[in-house]
Image (cartoon, helix red, strand yellow):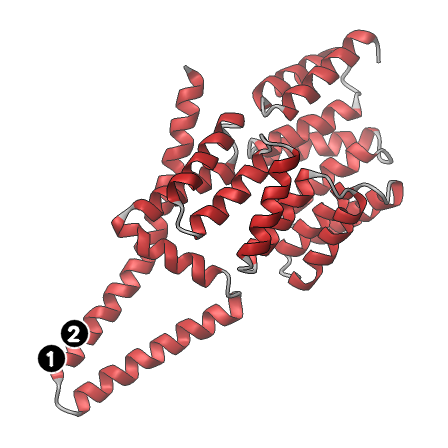
Amino acid sequence: MDRNLDRLLEQAVTQVQHGHLDGAIDSLKQLLSLEPDCAEAHAYLSMCLLDKRRLHAATKEAEIAITLEPEIELSNYAVAHVMMAQRRFKEAATHLDRLLDIDPNDERYYRMYADLYHLTNEKDKILPALQKALELSPDNPDVLADLSDYYFSTDDLKLAEQFAEDALHREAEHKHGLVAMGNVLLRYGKVDEARQHAVWALRLDPDDRSALHLISSVKARSNLFLGLWWKYNSWISNKGTTRSILILLGAFIVYRIASMLSADLGHSDIARIINYIWLGIVIYTFVGPTIFTKSLKKEISEVQLNREF
């Protein structure tokens, strides 16, 4: 590439690092209009489009990149991300293995494997992958924030807070670290502090979905109607699929036993009240996620509207 193309690529990378995805996409398109066969530009464009949740376009760009340069890291990196987004996990693993063959000391690929294990529900493999990433890059705030997320998911708030603090100590404006710390603070009930971290992260990247999810969680936690659902959802989501099903099944069995015993003992009014309470709980658990999803979409639309101005 000539100097002008190099400048456009460097500009796009800088824009991505600062969360300016639309600007990066424009820069990459300008580059590709001058040099259509630049695999690196296609790969970067694929990842930008994926972050914008334009999966079809991201897939097309990743396919072009891997066709042009099947052996370079960026092409395989882009394809691996696209395959994970499409839930084509075996193909994603193939490209991740290729990346590790190219550079076994890049912590990003172990972090990606941790994401893959999360998606495939291989929870016992997540921590070893992150620990390997930490071994390779002990001061990397991305790795530290990932570890904070992992321990948060296991309900170990002390370690989650420690790794989030470490990430922010190394980079005060680390978006992922801010969100990780915000999640911990919210779980501790420190709603105002959690909101501050969410707003800070959104100032860095208004399109970041994890930050938008956090600000919506803050609003749900502060809302009288959604507060109980948020606490229940936070608790049940950390129990795992099998344990969650067993808990719900146990609750249903207790409800049925209480209802039938009340009826058998002649307390029909009590049995009716128990049935109404159970029906209310069922409706509440169905309505809560819908309202939360609408709140999240509203946050996204408001952020997009603000950016237009």
Count of numbered tags:
2
- Whether residue 66 appears in this view of the structure is no
Q: What is the spatial separation of the Cα atoms under label 2 and label 1, in whole angstroms? A: 6 Å
Q: Quadrant of residue 144?
A: top right
Name the residue: 71% across, 51% down: 130
What crowding class fits label 1: few (fewer than 14 Cα within 10 Å), some (14-19), or many (20 or more)?
A: few
In the picture, measured across the screen, residue 112 lies left or right of residue 256, that is right
* Image x and y of residue 153, in percent: 55, 56
* Image x and y of residue 118, in percent: 63, 55
Q: Are marks 2 and 1 in contact (CB under 8 Å)?
A: yes
Q: Which numbered circle lies on residue 273?
A: 2
Name the residue: 72% across, 13% down: 8
In the picture, measured across the screen, residue 12 lies left or right of residue 95, that is left
* Image x and y of residue 217, in percent: 40, 45
Q: Which residue is mark 1?
A: 269
What SS does tag 1 mark? helix
Up the image or down, 296 lies above or below 199; here it is below
In the displayed image of the protein, which residue is found farthest to the bottom?
265
In the picture, measured across the screen, residue 69 lies left or right of residue 60, that is right
Q: Amino acid at mark 1?
A: Asp
Up the image or down, 191 lies above or below 230; here it is above
Q: Quadrant of residue 73?
A: top right
Placement of the C terminus among the 4 image quadrants: top left
Q: Amino acid at mark 2?
A: Ile
Q: Nearer the viewer, residue 279 or 57?
A: 279
* Image x and y of residue 129, in percent: 74, 54
Q: Which numbered circle lies on residue 22?
A: none
Q: Nearer the viewer, residue 235 or 138?
A: 138
What SS does tag 2 mark? helix
- Whether residue 200 appears in this view of the structure is yes
Up the image or down, 151 lies above or below 267; here it is above
Name the residue: 34% across, 56% down: 229
